[in-house]
Amino acid sequence: MIPLWRAGAAALILIGLAGFALPKARAAGAEPALLGDFGDWAAYSYKAADTKVCYVSSRPKSSEPKTSKRDPAFFLVTNMPGRKVKGEVSTLIGYTFKQESSVDLTVDDTKFLMRTVGDGAWAEDSATDKKIVAAMRTGKSLTVAGTSARGTDTFDTYSLTGVSAALTKIDEACK
């Protein structure tokens, strides 16, 4: 089971992504500030009620099946020092996952498992987050394979170009 604070992180990130995906959207006055673009990744920060939030985000370079109708997908790594969260890995997939399913995350040839809640997925614990982030820093590509509530299998492929610099930026901004 995903800890509730991880599901809460998705709400915070959605607030931040609102500035990217829906420019007019606002929640609790949070407006993300772009810290920089780094290859295929961008770094952002904003102030939530109880903590500063810093995150890196990227969109898939390719998604299968191409005919699948869904909202935009994002892959994120988040720091929330006020909650003692550093390097939390998540994806917002753009559809509701099949209940009680998991996501296969692969960085180059290294496989990880993520747990799903609604339209998001997270690593099981912070130790797994650390392993994923370490693999991302040295990797070339990342794939996310999941199954929608309707039974559609999807595969998103992300470039990791620039992720290491983007992660360094949020580590500096959210100490």
Image: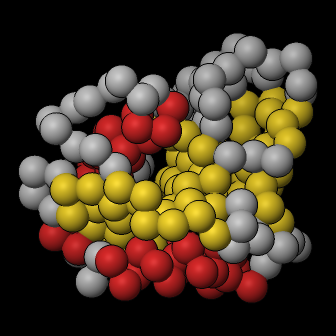
Query: Which of the 4 quarters of the picture holds residue 50?
Result: bottom left
> How is the model colour-coded?
secondary structure
Query: Which of the 4 quarters of the picture holds residue 106?
Result: bottom right
Asked if 88 appears above or below 32 in the picture, the reply is below
Residue 10 appears anywhere in the view: no
Residue 121 place in picture, x, y as percent: 54, 46
Residue 29 place in picture, x, y as percent: 16, 38
**Residue occupying the point 22% across, 43% down:** 30
**Residue occupying the point 35% across, 55% down:** 33
In the shown orientation, is residue 57 left or right of residue 18?
Answer: right
Residue 12 appears anywhere in the view: yes
Residue 144 place in picture, x, y as percent: 74, 50
Residue 75 place in picture, x, y as percent: 60, 52
Query: Which sits in the foreground, 14 or 104?
Result: 14
Asked if 81 appears above or below 12 in the picture, the reply is below
Query: How many numbered circles does the render carry?
Result: 0
**Residue occupying the point 72% across, 31% down:** 147
Asked if 75 appears above or below 129 in the picture, the reply is above
In the shown orientation, is residue 90 left or right of residue 98?
Answer: left
The quarter in which the C terminus is drawn is bottom left
**Residue occupying the point 71% across, 67% down:** 39
In the shown orientation, is residue 132 left or right of residue 50?
Answer: right
